[in-house]
Each structure stands twice: as C-alpha cells, then as structure tokens.
C-alpha cells in the first residue's frame, strides 16, 4: 500500500468516525449511563470505522489497508480532534455536524501521515532491493 492509499484510508476512517459521533452523540444526544457504557460506545465506533474502511477499500479494489494501522488512526482521531470539538459543539445544526465531519477527516489525514511516510519508505527500500537483484 502506498502513501496516497494510506492517507485516503486514514481520511475515510476519520470521516466515518466523525459521522458516527456527529449522529449518535450530537444529533441523537445519546448519553451513556455509566463510564463502562461510554467506553463501550466509543470503542465500538472506533472499531466500526476501521473495519468499514477496510471492507469498503477491499470491495472497491482500491487497496487493502492494515487494521494495525487503521485502529491507531481511528483511536487517535477520536481523542484529539473529534472528542474536543464535540464537547465544544454549540448545537446540533447541520453546520456543526459538517464541521465535526470535516475535522474528523482532517484528523484522519493527520494521524495517517506517519503511516504513509513509513509505507513510502518501506516501499522504496523494497523496490531498490528488487531492482538491484533484477540487474544481477
């Protein structure tokens, strides 16, 4: 998987996660009764967004993203941009919901950047090794 595909999968993960948060927590106003319930809902949204992006990417034939990369991207995107903007959301208007989704997409891009750089680095080193062996 190259860097562009990694960034695309990260942005998709952030967008799906932000959409879930915007609909479930902001629009519907679901408030879990306990810390355990909140943790279960949060982790469910995090895992659901990563699995959804993996399945959509595979079905479309775009790429085969690793869940080992999508889970941290989803987890970090949830805690840094999405949770903060959700707590500060003034209302549940469409503008607020779209802002949450946009911030989730940007957060997914941001947190997928290290993975994209690593995939590019790893891909270049693999290509250079195969090119050397092909010339011999």
Image (cartoon, grey):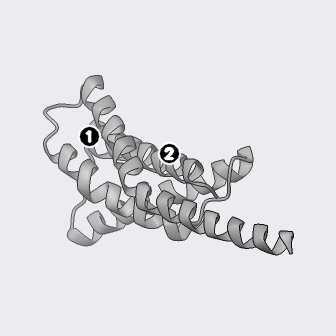
Question: Residue 69: x percent and y percent?
Answer: 50, 66
- Mark 1 residue element: helix
Q: To which residue does mark 1 refer?
A: 26
At x 20%, y 44%, the residue is 85
Of the image marks 1 and 2, the number of the one nearer the N terminus: 2
Query: Eyeballing the image, is 26 above or below 126?
Result: above
Query: Eyeballing the image, is 83 above or below 115?
Result: above
Give 125 or 5, whichever is nearer the viewer.
125
Q: To which residue does mark 2 refer?
A: 12
Q: Quadrant of residue 93?
A: top left
- Mark 2 residue element: helix
Question: Residue 96: x percent and y percent?
Answer: 24, 30
10 vs 29, left or right, is right
55 vs 48, left or right, is right
Question: Residue 111: x percent and y percent?
Answer: 37, 56
**Does residue 48 show up?**
no
């Amino acid at each position: 998987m190259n860097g562009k595909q990694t960034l695309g999968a990260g942005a998709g993960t952030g967008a799906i996660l932000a959409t879930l948060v915007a609909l479930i927590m902001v629009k519907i106003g679901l408030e879990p009764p306990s810390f355990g319930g909140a943790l279960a809902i949060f982790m469910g949204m995090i895992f659901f967004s990563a699995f959804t992006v993996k399945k959509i990417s595979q079905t479309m034939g775009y790429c085969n993203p690793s869940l080992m990369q999508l889970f941290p991207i989803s987890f970090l995107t949830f805690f840094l941009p999405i949770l903060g903007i959700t707590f500060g959301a003034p209302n549940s208007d469409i503008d607020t919901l779209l802002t949450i989704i946009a911030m989730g997409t940007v957060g997914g891009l941001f947190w997928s950047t290290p993975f994209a750089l690593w995939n590019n680095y790893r891909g270049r080193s693999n290509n250079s090794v195969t090119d050397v062996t092909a010339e011999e």
